[in-house]
Image: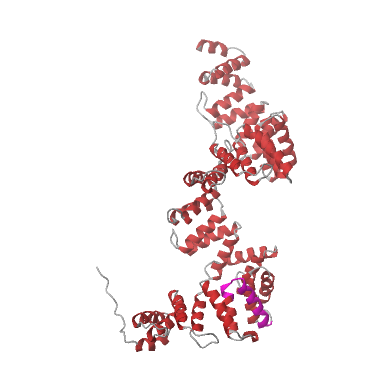
């Protein structure tokens, strides 16, 4: 056979190419390659294409992408359509070209089998340079590639109408990528179920050729009932098929379906495994879900340290919700070292990603004086922009910025205007607006109108508003005095955990008000507030125990509470302590 190869090499380049193709078909790549090279050097475009593929696939020669690119370019310049199509694919998927940034990956079609890992960044311009002539020459694969570039490339290359036409041509030739692209194009413009159903038909044809993305998209359509019957069961199986074919988003959806038992029997272990696989491939949503699993716990207690690792991974993938969750962990010291500066950093990232809760978190740190001047200005700008778009919560937050001088000069008059606008739908704004009316901030004081707004906030369940309303009812503000109603409002706030309200309920039950005296109830509420660190409640509980005012006398415990009150700066307890017969406790030495 070697003699035959040498004899063949003396023949015409076309004959050399034919012999190389025979050897290639027979699986003898090592003997085929030198014949392809000889014919390629003679200028045969097909042979040059074969040499390029050999270097790309490592068939009979070591893999060399630079050599592959050089030979494929020669073939493409010679008009060989397959070379043009392959070159376009390689540039599109960053398999050849300039160095790839971290995380670069393909989005729609599958790259050639031998080289699935991108090594360079996407080069849409060079990809279009070769996809266009191949598409115009009638290659269905190139037509789909060209359409994809026109759809997903940089703005200066995009032409959605032309892309749709090329997808139709490719699909008409029964190209799987053409069906997939046309399905996506139809979904992009679909306004009713009929149009969505037409898109689903194209995606089914792509799925029949096992294009992984098609399985995932059909799963989405079944889950949402868009163009296909709503079926969580069918959606789950399509997600499974996409996941098994390596679609990252399919892994995430299949994992979530298993985790929650959506359309499939619940399997938390397998579900977590698929979510982890998707997260390890860079799916931020999957990483955030894994973080949530650890943060919430289940059969085992929460593992905040592990949650922090997954939230960080999700946040690094631009998941705003995970960035906020990570910020909360740093703020509270759960699973990580407590670090307010680090919390601010992650709140900032989440807020810049559009998470409104994170914007409010950052605003709270700003109000507490724990953020930079830049954060103060940025926070105010977010709220001002959103407020101007009609967001009532943002209008309230912008009003707070104006009222407190956060990132802008303090302006009570403008603050009142925004608070009034937000008060139509935001409870906190009702409270603030009412308080500012009562105090006459930015407007002439109007206690009666202010009380109306405080009442609205209190009725909506805001504990601070309930306490302020109770205080106004006790003090006869706005000409209204009603101790029984005040007690009810204090009790409602206390039931929500408002420590000051607990103390006030105790004080009212203790006597001296237009309500029935109940010292046992008073002692109970003083104790609740005292246990939460309220200094005056600690003092009152100590006095009740020292004097037996609620029927129980306990000087030992009384001294404990009185000393706690004294440690908070309440000097008036000194006389109470002096009158106790129980001596002051001596400090205890630590036992070894």
Q: Is residue 138 left or right of residue 324?
A: right
Q: Is residue 252 magenta?
A: no
Verify whether residue 445 appears in magenta.
yes
Q: Is residue 191 left or right of residue 281?
A: right
Is residue 199 or residue 97 the one in the foreground? 199
Q: Magenta residues, as a range?
A: 444-465
Quarter of the image for residue 193 reads: top right
Q: 561 and 354: which one is in front?
A: 561
Instruction: Indicate the position of residue 419 as horizontal and vertical percent values.
Output: 66, 72
Quadrant containing the C terminus is bottom left
Vertical placement of residue 283 versus 67, above or below: below
Image location of residue 156, percent across then percent down: 70, 44
Q: Can residue 549 be seen from the camera position used here?
A: yes
Q: Residue at x 58, y 62 (%)?
A: 357
Q: Main secondary structure of the magenta part?
A: helix
Q: What colouring does the structure picture have? A: secondary structure
Give x and y (percent) for residue 368.
53, 71
Residue lying furthest left:
592
Q: Position of residue 9 (x, y in %)?
A: 57, 14
Residue ID at (60%, 17%): 17
């Amino acid at each position: 056979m070697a003699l035959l190869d040498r004899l063949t090499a003396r023949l015409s380049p076309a004959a050399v190419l034919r012999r190389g193709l025979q050897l290639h078909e027979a699986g003898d790549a090592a003997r085929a390659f030198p014949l392809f090279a000889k014919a390629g050097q003679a200028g045969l475009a097909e042979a040059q294409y074969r040499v390029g593929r050999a270097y790309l696939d490592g068939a009979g020669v070591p893999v060399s992408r630079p050599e592959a690119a050089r030979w494929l370019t020669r073939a493409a310049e010679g008009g060989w359509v397959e070379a043009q199509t392959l070159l376009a694919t390689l540039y599109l998927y960053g398999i050849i070209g300039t160095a790839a940034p971290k995380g670069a990956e393909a989005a729609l079609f599958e790259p050639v089998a031998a080289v699935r890992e991108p090594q360079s960044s996407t080069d849409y311009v060079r990809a279009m340079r070769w996809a266009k002539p191949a598409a115009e020459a009638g290659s269905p694969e190139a037509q789909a590639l060209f359409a994809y570039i026109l759809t997903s490339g940089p703005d200066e290359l995009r032409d959605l109408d032309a892309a749709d036409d090329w997808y139709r041509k490719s699909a008409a030739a029964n190209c799987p990528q053409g069906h997939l692209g046309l399905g996506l194009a139809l979904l992009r413009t679909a306004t009713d179920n009929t149009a969505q159903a037409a898109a689903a038909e194209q995606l089914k044809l792509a799925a029949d050729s096992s294009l992984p993305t098609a399985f995932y998209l059909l799963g989405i359509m079944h889950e949402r009932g868009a163009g296909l019957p709503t079926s969580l069961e069918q959606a789950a199986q399509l997600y499974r098929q996409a996941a098994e074919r390596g679609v990252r988003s399919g892994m995430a959806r299949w994992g979530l379906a298993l985790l929650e038992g959506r359309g499939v029997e619940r399997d938390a272990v397998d579900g977590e495994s698929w979510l982890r696989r998707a997260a390890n491939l860079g799916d931020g949503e999957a990483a955030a879900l894994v973080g949530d699993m650890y943060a919430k716990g289940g059969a085992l207690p929460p593992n905040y340290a592990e949650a922090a690792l997954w939230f960080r991974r999700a946040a690094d993938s631009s998941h705003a919700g995970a960035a906020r969750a990570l910020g909360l962990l740093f703020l509270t010291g759960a699973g990580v070292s407590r670090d307010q500066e680090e919390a601010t950093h992650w709140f900032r990232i989440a807020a810049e990603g559009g998470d409104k809760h994170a914007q409010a978190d950052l605003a709270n740190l700003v109000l507490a004086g724990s953020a930079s001047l830049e954060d103060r200005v940025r926070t105010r700008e977010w709220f001002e922009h959103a407020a101007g778009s009609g967001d009532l919560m943002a209008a309230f937050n912008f009003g707070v910025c104006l009222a407190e001088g956060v990132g802008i000069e303090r302006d009570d008059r403008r603050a009142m205007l925004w608070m009034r606008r937000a008060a139509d739908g935001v409870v906190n704004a009702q409270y603030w607006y009412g308080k500012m009316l009562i105090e006459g901030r930015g407007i002439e004081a109007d206690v009666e109108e202010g009380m109306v707004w405080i009442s609205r906030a209190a009725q909506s369940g805001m504990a601070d508003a309930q306490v302020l309303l109770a205080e106004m009812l006790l003090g006869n503000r706005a000409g209204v005095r009603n101790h029984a109603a005040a007690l009810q409002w204090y009790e409602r706030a206390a039931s929500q955990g408002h420590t000051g309200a607990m103390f006030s309920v105790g004080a009212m039950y203790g006597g001296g008000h237009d309500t029935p005296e109940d010292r046992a109830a008073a002692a109970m509420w003083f104790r609740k507030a005292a246990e939460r660190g309220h200094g005056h409640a600690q003092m009152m509980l100590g006095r009740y125990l020292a004097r037996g005012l609620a029927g129980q006398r306990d000087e030992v415990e009384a001294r404990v509470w009185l000393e706690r009150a004294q440690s908070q700066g309440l000097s008036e307890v000194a006389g109470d302590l002096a009158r106790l017969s129980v001596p002051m406790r001596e400090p205890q030495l630590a036992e070894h």
